[in-house]
């Protein structure tokens, strides 16, 4: 484990201690519970705990059955009455080890916020609207003096979220800023990338290169990013009088998409259906890079040449997943650092004017042309 990963995982554990409002002498959550909450491997949790133990922040009990006890409240995750004037942001997001986009948002926010003296408190919704709602209720039920100064939310459901009414109520008392995903027709501060640009730019590139028969594999139908990428792509094709045929649209059935190994079986089945289409598509657009790499794996096993026989386009520039591909991907790289800087600007603007109207900012992603097209 590299030093940056270790520091990040230590912070995640310390934030769980803060969320549980533990005092010196209390037993911290077990390794198994931290694994579940943080979606980390057992080895990652154990390594971070051992590091915290060596620093004297926690200490192992004397008997084998005793867990680790908190020895001192770490600086930077104390409650508001111990922080002086330090601003705090509680960020609710569906953190998983395989979600590259969420991890990049978190790491860039952590880096820039720390330099500005802002205390970032991370809470994992586990991609569950129920857990998202529970965390929001917990925050809202606290006295104003113990709430964070700002709430950031990357929601797991942009389309039919039962927590929306509560979020609107919270926003009247606690500034809420949506990150990466927004609610259509609702006024909140929002920072993200232009997924409409991603969809239309993808269509433009394929049309310029003579592709008329195209397939699309989408996932996460409940979040605005995937919806906007697909709808803008489809609209761009319609405007060019080359409609995306219904039989050429495929969806992953598992909403909580995991690693390539987790989705390879379903992508193999979708790949077989793509190869059976008449006329056969010359390009496949994928909602994100994990789908694209899994599809290239399927095509390679079935002697389909990429890109000579069929082109494949992904999204998110997931470098970890891209390293598993035999070909460099055509994909989009998002400006996470710019989003983090805009978050600082939003915090300052709202801090100086609590009645500032909701402001949405979207950044354009870089289109990277790789060997897969």
Image: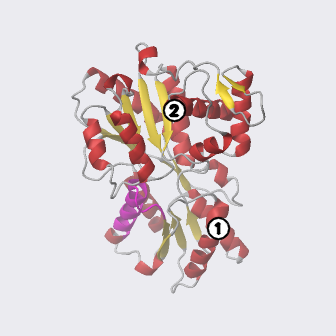
> In the rendered structure, does residue 223 fall within the stretch colored magenta?
yes
The answer to whether marks 1 and 2 mark residues whose Cβ atoms lie closer than 8 Å is no
Q: Which residues are magenta?
A: 219-237
Residue beneath disc 1: 264
Q: Splitting the image into 4 quarters, where does residue 173 fall? A: top left
**Badge 2: few (under 14), some or many (20 or more) residues near its Cα, within 10 Å?**
few
In the rendered image, residue 288, in percent from the top left (x then y), is placed at 53, 58
- Magenta stretch prevailing secondary structure: helix
Give the structural element (helix, strand or loop) at label 1.
Answer: helix
Q: Residue 207: which numbered mark, if any?
A: none
127 horizontally vs 372: left or right: left
Give residue 279's position: percent from left, percent from top: 51, 85
Measured along the vertical axis of the image, is residue 47 above or below residue 302? Answer: above
Q: Quadrant of the N terminus?
A: top right
Badge 1 local density, few (<14 within 10 Å), some, or many (20+)? many
Relative image position of residue 350 (x, y in whole percent): 29, 27
255 sits to left or right of 160? right
| Residue drawn at the location 55% of the way across and 41% of the way down | 104
Residue extending farthest top: 84
Comparing marks 1 and 2, which lies closer to the viewer?
2
Which residue carries the number 2 mark? Answer: 20
Residue occupying image coordinates x 65% and y 56%: 328
Q: Position of residue 110 (x, y in %)?
A: 53, 30
The figure's colour scheme reads secondary structure
Name the one closer to the observer, 186 or 165.
165
Q: Nearer the viewer, residue 123 or 290?
A: 123
| Residue 211 visible within the image | no
For the residue labelled by badge 2, is the local secondary structure a helix, a strand or a loop?
loop
Q: Quadrant of the C terminus?
A: bottom right
Q: For the residues marked 1 and 2, what is the alpha-carbon distance in whole angstroms?
A: 38 Å
Q: Earlier in the sequence, mark 1 or mark 2?
A: 2
Q: Nearer the viewer, residue 369 or 325?
A: 325
């Amino acid at each position: 484990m590299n030093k940056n990963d270790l520091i990040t995982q230590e912070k995640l554990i310390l934030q769980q201690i803060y969320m549980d409002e533990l005092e010196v002498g209390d037993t911290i959550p077990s390794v198994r519970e931290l694994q579940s909450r943080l979606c980390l491997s057992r080895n990652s949790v154990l390594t971070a705990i051992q590091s915290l133990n060596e620093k004297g922040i926690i200490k192992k009990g004397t008997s084998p059955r005793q867990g680790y006890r908190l020895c001192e409240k770490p600086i930077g995750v104390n409650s508001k009455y111990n922080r002086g004037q330090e601003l705090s942001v509680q960020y609710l997001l569906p953190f998983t080890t395989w979600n590259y986009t969420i991890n990049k948002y978190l790491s860039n926010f952590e880096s820039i916020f720390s330099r500005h003296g802002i205390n970032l408190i991370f809470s994992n919704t586990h991609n569950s609207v129920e857990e998202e709602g529970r965390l929001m209720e917990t925050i809202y039920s606290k006295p104003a003096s113990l709430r964070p100064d700002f709430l950031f939310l990357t929601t797991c459901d942009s389309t039919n979220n039962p927590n929306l009414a509560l979020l609107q109520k919270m926003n009247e008392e606690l500034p809420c800023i949506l990150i990466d995903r927004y609610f259509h027709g609702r006024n909140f501060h929002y920072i993200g990338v232009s997924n409409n640009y991603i969809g239309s730019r993808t269509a433009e590139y394929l049309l310029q290169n003579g592709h008329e028969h195209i397939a699309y594999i989408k996932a996460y139908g409940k979040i605005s990013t995937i919806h906007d990428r697909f709808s803008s792509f489809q609209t761009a094709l319609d405007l060019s009088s080359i409609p995306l045929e219904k039989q050429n649209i495929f969806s992953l059935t598992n909403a909580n998409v995991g690693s390539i190994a987790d989705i390879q079986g379903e992508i193999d089945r979708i790949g077989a259906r793509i190869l059976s289409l008449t006329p056969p598509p010359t390009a496949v657009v994928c909602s994100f890079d994990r789908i694209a790499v899994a599809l290239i794996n399927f095509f390679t096993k079935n002697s389909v040449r990429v890109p000579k026989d069929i082109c494949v386009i992904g999204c998110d520039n997931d470098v970890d997943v891209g390293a598993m591909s035999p070909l460099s991907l055509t994909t989009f790289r998002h400006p996470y650092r710019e989003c983090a800087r805009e978050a600082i600007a939003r915090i300052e603007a709202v801090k100086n004017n609590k009645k500032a109207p909701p402001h949405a900012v979207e950044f354009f992603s870089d289109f990277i042309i790789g060997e897969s097209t």
